[in-house]
Amino acid sequence: MTKHLRTALLCTAFGLALGAGGAQAATIKVGVIAPFSGPFAMVGKTFKEAIAVYQAEHGTTVGADTVEFIFKDLDQANPAQSKALAQELIVKEKVGYLAGFFFTPDALAVAPLIDEANIPAVIFNAATSAITEKSPRYVRTSFTLWQNTVPLAEHMAKQGIKKVVTAVSDYGPGIDGETAFKATFEKAGGSVVDTIRMPLKSNDFAPFMQRIKDSGAEAIYAFLPAGPTTLAFAKAFADNGLKDKGIKFFGPGDITQEPDLPALGDAALGITTTFNYSQSHDSAKNKAFLAKHKELFGSSDTVTFTSVGAYDGAHVIYTMIQKTGGKSDGLKAVDAVKGMSWESPRGPLTINPDSRHVTQTIYLRLVETVDGKLQNVEKAAFADQPDYGYKVGK
């Protein structure tokens, strides 16, 4: 970091502390970095809409202070651009909080900046376990691949499945998923007969499908980031005859996020996933969340896991502001929410004081047709799941 940038960041943090700590009401700005255009634009849309739902329910003020969200577009994984946007938000916009981050590399890129400026970053999605180890100012309200994968691998072993191929995108979360699955499944007596790592920007999956066919596996465990890649992979699985051959399809819920189900059609039927949320979750809190979303936007069809990551992230940010009296101090803000528990549309959540990641219920879901509509139907619940990957091997 240059001397000029370091000075600017420190001055910004000092200015925020004076402004927020004074007697007069302040505007507390939250910078949200996410894809609002390009192939992953649905993510940014769900973030923005979930924040709007939260503010419609809870208002735009905390005490005397007004909370303003500022959105910056990062259309695909680009750590350098993520860092540049964070610098702009901190120095020019004088935000007191950063939030968002769909891809892991983009979240990791801002660690030096949040430490220098002493502001928190609340991660709405990025799911590699190691992220929160890189700065004490990170808090995460989404999930990790370890958290979703361990109960899934245990479930598959209990179903008598013996031979599995893992197929994951070749970056942090995919490697976490592969590692978690292999360790858990083999411990339970199963065998991983092949491990496939696919480039993050893959769009032709036919060669990988042939490799899976040739492996003799009974099932696959697959992870790709939600969006066009998961849609293409799930379609390729069906189109290349793996489903007809009887190979079973398992993975985290990115594979069958709700906005993609109509496009997947019958190819999605029978896919089994574990995840922290589905629209069909039967709780009063979720029904109220969906109803408010429909009231504001005319439909709740696009609500998915990224929606609750942002909704709960907004709740954590509001709580930080309330518990610190609006003062800008990243470490104190994070300390204020360690151990906090609340009821989310997805179920009960607690921020683990050590990992600063949510402990939550992970649900086993099966894609079925319900009243003419494809849904992720919950079949079982695994309560109080931690991030099993936090500080693994350290």
Image (cartoon, rainbow, N blue to C red):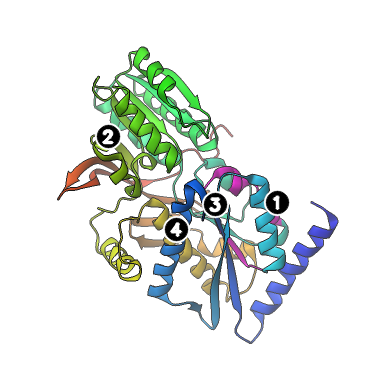
The answer to whether the residues at label 3 and label 4 have Cβ atoms under 8 Å apart is no
| Part of the protein shown in magenta | 94-115
In this rendering, the answer to whether 99 lies above or below 160 is below
**Residue 195 visible in rendering:** yes
Residue designated by label 2: 267
Counting from the top left corner in percent of width and height, residue 324 is at: 57, 72
Image quadrant holding the C terminus, namely top right
Q: Which mark is residue 101?
A: 3
First in residue order: circle 4 vs circle 1: 4
Relative to the observer, which residue lies in front, 79 or 124? 79
SS class of the residue under badge 1? Answer: helix
Q: Is 228 positioned to the left or the right of 363 in the image? A: right
Residue designated by label 4: 45
Question: Depth-wise, is mark 3 or mark 1 nearer the camera?
Answer: 3
**Residue drawn at (34%, 57%) of the image:** 348
Q: In which quarter of the image is residue 215?
A: top left
The answer to whether the residues at label 2 and label 4 have Cβ atoms under 8 Å apart is no
Task: Residue type at mark 3: give it.
Answer: Phe
SS class of the residue under badge 3? Answer: loop
First in residue order: circle 3 vs circle 4: 4
Give me the C-alpha separation between circle 1 and circle 2: 43 Å
Question: Depth-wise, is mark 2 or mark 3 nearer the camera?
Answer: 2
Question: Depth-wise, is mark 4 or mark 1 nearer the camera?
Answer: 4
